[in-house]
Amino acid sequence: MSEEKIKLTGLSHGGGCGCKLAPGVLQKLLAGVRPGIIPPQLLVGTETSDDAAVYQINEHQAIVATTDFFMPIVDDPYDFGRIAATNAISDVYAMGGTPLFALALVGMPVSVLPLDTIGRILEGGEAVCRAASIPIAGGHTIDSVEPIYGLVAIGLVNPAHLKRNAGARPGDRLILGKPLGVGVYSAALKKEKLSESDYENMIANTTQLNTPGPVLACLDGVHAVTDVTGFGLLGHLMEVCKGSGVRANVEFSALPLLGRALEFADAGYVTGASGRNWAGYGEAVQLAAGLGDNERALLTDPQTSGGLLVSCTPDTVTEVLSIFLQQGFSHVSVIGEIVEGEPAIVVS
């Protein structure tokens, strides 16, 4: 069987970061887990649902450790591998860290997928790691019912430059590095509604490494950083609000979107994860009267390998935007601000 005849997305019940457990389900699961050993060197654990764990090893160095894996979001095996690897490494960048090496996590239905197709997935992941200047130093493989690929990503960060999702302050501006809409594009792809240029835009977006992270981390005016993935913009911004004890105002018209995102949402090409996301945190979100189901679908749209979300002082905005633009993030936008108040989000 040739790889052209195999639809990877047809072998899984979900794809990309849309595979994540819904926020409400995850919260219930973790609520029943008793905290284990928490040494003082563990600078970041599970307390604020941050992007990675951080463990200090000396005054100037801390290990950043994260893992991410999912089922296919596209049918091309090489592109699937690239997207999954980019997404996993992003969590290191989001903490302000520099990647060191990765371990591959591979689960494949070996009786269904030819070995050369599986090989192309691994080649895609390797290509992204090469672009990030890190090796894949090992990993683990299993024979699974659905295809799964991802990485364990290990990095280093200076504790003085560590950026968490819990440091936002009233008066900060919110900046988003990549456009939204990956989830609706993936839903449209399954219905064969993406043009070649639409697909190319989606791949370019999901395989762009969030390399501004370590540079942004060195700026005193940057108070919080996270990346937007499976819980959508509102979900990950809500984690920032809860961790920081603040409220966020977002201007929908300022959000960067993939070119046909609203069109696809209007046509009904949304993922089931979008509705599950809203059910998990929608009660803490206030939408302006003019915003309907399409806008809500994009605000909760699960992003696979999404952009960095930055909270910074007003006088740091120009420098933050410049760093993004210099590294090729042409859609970077100021999307709102942080204000005082109970953790919540207001979208106008």
Image (spheres, rainbow, N blue to C red):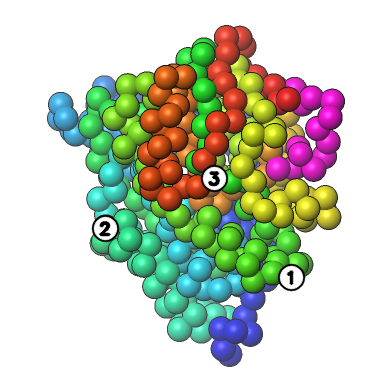
The residue nearer to you, when weighing 108 against 235, is 235
3 or 1: mark nearer the eye: 3
Q: Callout 2 environment at 10 Å: few (<14), some (14 to 19), or many (20+)?
A: few
User: Which mark sits nearer the N-terminus, 2 or 3?
Assistant: 2
For label 1, the crowd category at 10 Å Cα-Cα, with few meaning under 14, some 14 to 19 and many 20 or more, is few
Indicate whether residue 193 is drawn in magenta: no
Q: Secondary structure at mark 2?
A: loop
Residue type, label 1: Glu
State the image coordinates of residue 295 (x, y, percent, origin top left).
76, 39
Screen quadrant of the C terminus: top right
Q: Earlier in the sequence, mark 2 or mark 1?
A: 2
Residue 27 visible at all: no
Q: Position of residue 260 (x, y in %)?
A: 71, 55
Q: What range is drawn magenta here?
A: 285-298
Height in image: 230 above or below 193? above
Give SS at disc 3: loop
x 47%, y 31%: residue: 310
The relative height of residue 47 versus residue 176 in the rendered view (above or below) is above
Residue 293 located within the stretch drawn in magenta: yes
As rendered, which of 32 and 313 lies closer to the eye? 313
The residue under label 2 is which amino acid type? Ser
Whether residues under marks 2 and 1 lie with C-beta atoms below 8 angstroms apart, the answer is: no
Report the residue marked by disc 2: 133
Observer-nearest of 209 and 46: 209
Residue at x 25% of width, y 41% of height: 156
Which numbered dot is residue 192?
A: 1
Q: Is residue 104 above or below residue 314?
A: below
Residue bearing mark 3: 331
Dividing the picture into quadrants, the one containing residue 248 is: top right
Given residues 21 and 64, the one toward you in this image is 64
Residue 87: tell me if it is visible: yes
User: Which label sits in the foreground, 2 or 3?
Assistant: 3
